[in-house]
Amino acid sequence: MEKRLLYLTILKLFCYVYTFMNNRIFLLHPATRAASEMFPLGLAILSAILRQNGYEVRVIDAAAPLKRLNDQQVLQMIKEFDPLFVGITLTIDFVSEKYKFINEIKGLKVPIVAGGPHVNYMPEEVLTYSNADIVSIGEGENAIIEICEYFQEKRNLESISGIGYKKDNSVHLTQKRALIEDLDSIPYPDYDDFQIRNYTGSDDPASDRMFWRIMSSRGCPYTCLFCTSNQVFGRKYRLSSARRMFDEMYYLHERYGAPTIALQDNEPLIDKNRISTLCDLLMSNKLNH
């Protein structure tokens, strides 16, 4: 009896240490019947934040048009990586297929965190039909680290704002997460996981004028009925400084050879003085051509 108790104690200790030491996060943009021409910029930002905080990250865009992966290939990648959890971004297209795939991932006994535009509109639906363990609602840059800490048993789930989860067969939503006020504090997106050849068939940085993108503002004061952005970023208009915009553009140009950079903002021109200052910086540093 004493030997059995000792064995169980050692096993529990091993499981605890393994969970605590596991710092691998798998981020996934799932494939659907339609290929995606644009890579998920949000995952590039999250991967940068996770790496900045010491996590090992693997990012897979299974919907990349020239490097599409089927479900079995992705499942094998997850199994081999053995992550702390899988973070999956959800949009409305083919969402029932994505729910089915999340249930397949659950068969690997790996926790799943779902985020993205569809989650922000339908968190209860996602938790009900996909069996995801947690949904992230709102901006995920700060939430992702707290979720990691939860799975490493460093934090209680209830203490994390801006998430939803199921407990006792009921959906529980925590308090709304505060918006990020200082957008300059967000690290540059990590493009290393998204090779342009997988989207254009060429290694030429100029092969797609819209590939290199920055998001320099969040929130929109307008009330367009067709827009989903306010569900994630709210209606309060927040913006990066012109200096931050220039620095990020310069970084993309120097590191990746980006010849053109698109703004993935809802309304980048609301503050015209900011754009004027950006233009001055580009011209004075000879980056205007």
Image (tube, grey):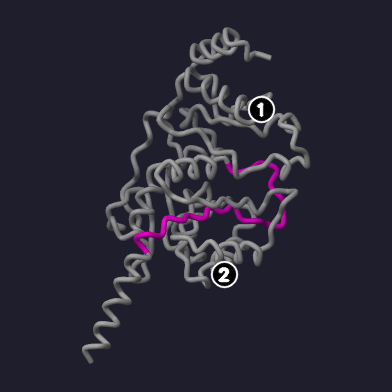
Label 2 or label 1, whichever lies nearer to me, is: 1
Name the residue beneath numbered marker 1: 257
Q: Residues within 10 Å of mark 1 (few under 14, many from 20)?
A: some
* Snapshot quadrant of residue 263: top right
Can you say whether 117 is above or below 70 in the image?
above
Quadrant of the rendering where the C terminus is positioned = top right
Q: Amino acid at mark 1?
A: Gly
Can you say whether 58 is above or below 240 in the image?
below
The residue shown at (53%, 19%) is: 246
The residue shown at (65%, 67%) is: 72
Local SS, label 2: helix
Local SS, label 1: loop
Q: Percent from the top left, x then y, of residue 243? A: 47, 18
Q: In front here: 145 or 118?
A: 145
The residue at the far bottom in this view is 1
Q: Percent from the top left, x then y, of residue 136? A: 43, 51
Can you say whether 215 is above or below 116 in the image?
above
Query: Disc 2 to disc 1, how far (Cα)?
Result: 39 Å
Name the residue beneath numbered marker 2: 104
- Is 123 magenta? The answer is no
Q: In front here: 51 or 267?
A: 51
Quadrant of the rendering where the N terminus is positioned = bottom left
- What numbered label is drawn on residue 267? none
Q: Amino acid at mark 2?
A: Glu
The region drawn magenta spans 19-40
The residue shown at (60%, 31%) is: 213
Q: In front here: 278 or 218?
A: 278
Q: In front here: 104 or 230?
A: 104
